[in-house]
Image: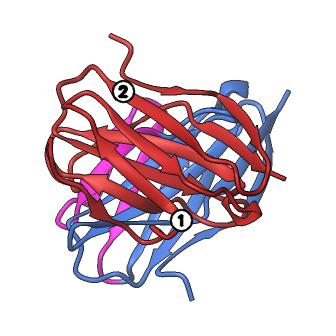
Amino acid sequence: NAGVTQTPKFQVLKTGQSMTLQCAQDMNHNSMYWYRQDPGMGLRLIYYSASEGTTDKGEVPNGYNVSRLNKREFSLRLESAAPSQTSVYFCASSEASIINEQFFGPGTRLTVL
Amino acid sequence: KNQVEQSPQSLIILEGKNCTLQCNYTVSPFSNLRWYKQDTGRGPVSLTIMTFSENTKSNGRYTATLDADTKQSSLHITASQLSDSASYICVVSRGGKLIFGQGTELSVKP
């Protein structure tokens, strides 16, 4: 039982490049989330998916898109990376709604030059 | 002003000592209050979850308390170990949203 997995672990991009962060969970959870964590700030929600086939914006969605590919997988795409998107990105999942316990992945450390 | 404020920002203690981390929140009402532990380079891991009607919740050497009147929560760590070195994050759940504190960085020295 791997829990929540994320790939890649590290990534360096140049301004304007695109990339997709992958996330998968094997706990049969309905809800999945993408957060970013910046120094001196709490985690901030980018997008979430309450169930397969649905996605909603969180607190900081600008510059990102998401895809809930199936119940297991939830990807985050940066279409044109900017230095302000340098951050650590965490994927999380929970059984149902956001008030349930969330399980986090190990994170992706992204640097945009 | 953040709705969830944690103090201190950082703390250094000696192995075997106890410590208490504080969380003050302005979010009200709320569904639950959580404490997470985040090791360096890892994702947060849940330690405790308390509803607004609970006063205390323990998980091994970790004990969380909640005072809804003063809107304060604390996380008490007993007999600290080197492996307790981590960031501890207080999170309040309200209206379908999670509001994260900035965390307290704890360093346990031998």
Q: Residue at x 38, y 34 (%)?
A: B59
Q: Nearer the viewer, residue B38 or A87?
A: A87
Q: Is residue A29 above or below residue B67?
A: above
The chain letter of the blue chain reads B
- The total number of labels drawn is 2
The chain letter of the red chain reads A
Which residue type carries mark 2?
Ala
The residue pinned by badge 2 equals A24
Q: Nearer the viewer, residue B88 or A77?
A: A77
Q: Quadrant of the N terminus of chain B?
A: bottom right
The residue pinned by badge 1 equals A63
Q: Residue at x 57, y 38 (%)?
A: B78
Q: Residues within 10 Å of mark 1 (few under 14, many from 20)?
A: some
Instruction: For mark 1, give the secondary structure.
Output: loop
For the residues labelled 2 and 1, say whether their Cβ atoms are less than 8 Å apart: no
Which residue type carries mark 1?
Gly
Marks 2/1: CA–CA distance: 22 Å
Q: Which residues are magenta?
A: B45-69
